[in-house]
Amino acid sequence: MQKLGAFLLIIVAVAILVVLGLFFYFLKVWVRAWMSGARVSLFNLIGMKLRSVNPTLIVDARIRLVKAGLELDTDALEAHFLAGGNVINVVQALIAADKANIELTFQRAAAIDLAGRDVYDAVRTSVNPKVIDCPDPAKGTTMLDAVAKDGIRLLVKARVTVRANLERLVGGATEDTIIARVGQGIVSAIGSSGTYKDVLENPDHISRKVLQSGLDSQTAFEIVSIDIADISVAGTGARDVANVGAMLETERAEADKKLRQAEAEGRRAMAIAAEQEMRAKVQEMQAKVVEAQAQIPQAIAGAFRAGKLGVMDFYRMQNIMADTAMRESISEGGDEKQQPKQ
């Protein structure tokens, strides 16, 4: 009996030591929760430890919520912790949203956090919009390349001010989509401009046109403004920027000159072709004349055979032809004497 009593006494002593150990182990956390008004039972803290949940983390999160005027039980915080979420980040997001009068429930905040988004940063972006560059310098491109209708290339850089849209943060497109859409809109707007001068004179028309296109649909952000930060004509160095107008006019004049030269060369080729055609026609007419002259002796012979032409008539015709040839030779010799010597 004495041995049994001693054994029971040992068991009771060990149990008391275990209870005291657990009590003192959770005493600091329990006292902090109790003094902060965010009371958590000791058995609940023990249960957290048994469920592999960090009691200190859960208690700290609950204290922050209570001090901010929010109420949330520890079960929801434990569930989010066990799901692999960032409890403190979610709590900070809830507190920031409450202070900024932004409607954000714990379920939505937890979903955003589990989706891999920084919910606290999203709330801060919703309160204080951030600026992103278009194009993104981190991708190796600092300027957008666009061409107006007159063929002049322009280099453009824009800054996009965005605000996070908490309702579309889960499943919404990221910043890369915003940058791509804005870049596409700027290139399209410049391409529809008549001349590069219109773009340089009124760059705000480009930003307004792009902003009205609804580029933030199905994205996690709401575009607040699009501002053209820099715009210049491509292919001009720093020394030529002041005279870019004169340089472009010179290049345009040179291009017009080459175009006119090409047109003149085309007209010259057409004239040469027409001249060759006329010469061919002259040769054709001369051939017809020779052909007609070759028929004269045949006609005379036919007249002799038919008795319509006599010998005296033939001699008279020969004399007339000889006299005509002599007169022509004399007249040609006189024209040569009248011409001045070279």
Image (cartoon, helix red, strand yellow):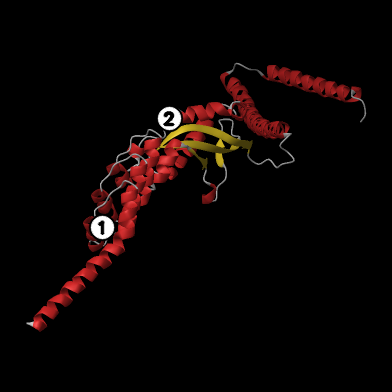
Q: Nearer the viewer, residue 51 or 217?
A: 51
Marking on residue 45: 1
- Residue 22 is situated, as x and y percent measured from the top left of the image, at 26, 65
Horizontal placement of 244 versus 224: left or right? right
Quick check: marks 2 and 1 in contact, CB under 8 Å?
no
Q: Nearer the viewer, residue 287 or 298?
A: 287
Can you tell which of label 2 and label 1 is closer to the viewer? 1
| Residue farthest front in this picture | 2
Q: Secondary structure at mark 2?
A: loop
Choose top left, top right, bottom left or bottom right for residue 309. Answer: top right
Q: Nearer the viewer, residue 303 or 189?
A: 189
Can you say whether 161 is above or below 49 in the image?
A: above
* Kind of residue at badge 1: Leu
Can you say whether 210 is above or below 170 in the image?
A: above
Q: Secondary structure at mark 1?
A: helix
Can you say whether 24 is above or below 329 in the image?
A: below
Q: Nearer the viewer, residue 169 or 260?
A: 169
Image quadrant in which the C terminus is located? top right
The answer to whether any part of residue 328 appears in the image is yes
Horizontal placement of 127 versus 195: left or right? left
Marking on residue 213: 2
Choose top left, top right, bottom left or bottom right for residue 295. Answer: top right
- Measure the alpha-carbon separation of dots 2 and 1: 54 Å
Can you say whether 51 is above or below 253 in the image?
A: below
